Amino acid sequence: MSTENIENNNTDKAEENVLEVFGIRPDMTLGEIMQTKPEVIPVLMEAGMHCISCPAAMMETLEEASIVHGIPVDELMKFIKESLERESSN
């Protein structure tokens, strides 16, 4: 999913800052996230963050990675939240 798709998915919702989603915070490294919440890997890939397979990304925070990919971290967190909620309801 591209940045455009993430933005389009959230245009009709009230603006809110999502600081933690299913135990995932923007200040966590991608390595921490992949170890503790491997179910978020496909979500990050769908958002266009294919960097998760890069060894250097292990030390990068989710917020830093979102900046590099041009995705506002608040929008990325909302996308993660919506995706994981959808998965948990199935």
Image (cartoon, helix red, strand yellow):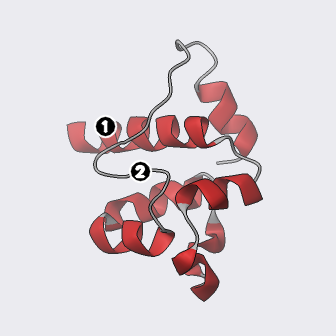
Measure the alpha-carbon separation of dots 2 and 1: 16 Å
- Image quadrant for the C terminus? top left
- Residue 4: image quadrant is top right
Residue mark closest to the camera, 2 vs 1:
2
Count numbered badges in the picture: 2
Q: Is residue 50 left or right of residue 89?
A: right
Amino acid type at image mark 2: Arg
Mark identifier at residue 25: 2
Mark identifier at residue 18: none
Image point 57% across, 36% down: which residue? 74
Assess disc 1: are there few (<14), some (14-19) or many (≥20) residues with their C-alpha within 10 Å of its C-alpha: few
Amino acid type at image mark 1: Glu
Secondary structure beneath label 2: loop
The percent coordinates of residue 72 (x first, y second) are 67, 40
The percent coordinates of residue 86 (x first, y second) are 33, 37
The percent coordinates of residue 44 (x first, y second) are 53, 58
Q: Is residue 34 left or right of residue 72?
A: left
Q: Residue 14 versus residue 87: which sits nearer the camera?
A: 14
The percent coordinates of residue 53 (x first, y second) are 57, 80
Image point 44% across, 75% down: which residue? 31
Secondary structure beneath label 1: helix
Residue assigned mark 1: 85
Image point 48% across, 56% down: which residue? 27
